[in-house]
Amino acid sequence: MSETGWCSTVPAGIRLAVQITANAKKTEVLGPFDAVLKIRLQAQPIEGKANLALIRYLAETLDVPRSAVVLTHGQSNKRKLLEIRSGGLTASAVVARLWPAAAA
């Protein structure tokens, strides 16, 4: 498996389509839904805190620097597009780390 509806390859690296729910009890991936990956964040949706928490979570999970995770669309929306700018990542590796059930 190389690509899904929520994870695809772009020239700069990998593009992720996510839908976030802020103010959750813990940060976790809920799974794919309607061509996005649903993620709960333990951050408030004010002053960009949820966006920063999302970038931090993805960087740690994918083992890339925070500067490699760029929010391209959806700054103030629950649906967001992000690019992971890393030549070493593949779409299948990202899927395996974020939603292992899809890679099995």
Image (cartoon, rainbow, N blue to C red):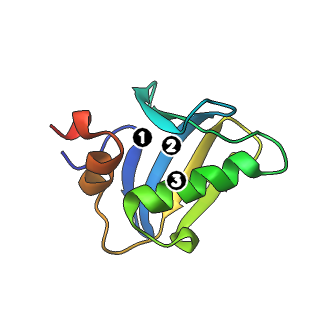
Counting labels gives 3
At label 3, counting other C-alpha atoms closer than 10 Å, the crowd grade (few under 14, some 14-19, many 20 or more) is some
Task: Kindly report which numbered mark, 3 or 1, lies closer to the viewer in this rendering.
Answer: 3
- The residue where tag 1 is placed is 6
- The residue where tag 3 is placed is 57
Residue 8 at what x, y percent from top left? Answer: 37, 51
Where, quadrant-wise, is the C terminus in this rendering?
top left
Q: Can you see residue 73?
A: no
At x 49%, y 73%, the residue is 65
Residue lying at the far right in this picture: please name it: 47
21 with respect to 31 (left or right): right
At label 1, counting other C-alpha atoms closer than 10 Å, the crowd grade (few under 14, some 14-19, many 20 or more) is many
User: What distance separates the C-alpha of mark 2 from that of mark 1?
Assistant: 5 Å
- SS at badge 3: helix
- SS at badge 1: loop
- The residue where tag 2 is placed is 17
At x 50%, y 43%, the residue is 17
Camera-side residue of 68 and 6: 68
At label 2, counting other C-alpha atoms closer than 10 Å, the crowd grade (few under 14, some 14-19, many 20 or more) is many
Q: Can you see residue 74?
A: yes
Q: Amino acid at mark 2?
A: Ala
Q: Amino acid at mark 1?
A: Trp
**First-in-chain label (3 vs 1):** 1
User: What distance separates the C-alpha of mark 3 from that of mark 1?
Assistant: 17 Å
Where, quadrant-wise, is the N terminus in this rendering?
top left
Residue 97 at what x, y percent from top left? Answer: 31, 50
Q: Amino acid at mark 3?
A: Tyr
At x 63%, y 57%, the residue is 72
Residue 82 appears in which quarter of the rendering? bottom right
**First-in-chain label (3 vs 2):** 2
22 with respect to 81 (left or right): right
Pointers 2 and 1 in contact (C-beta within 8 Å): yes
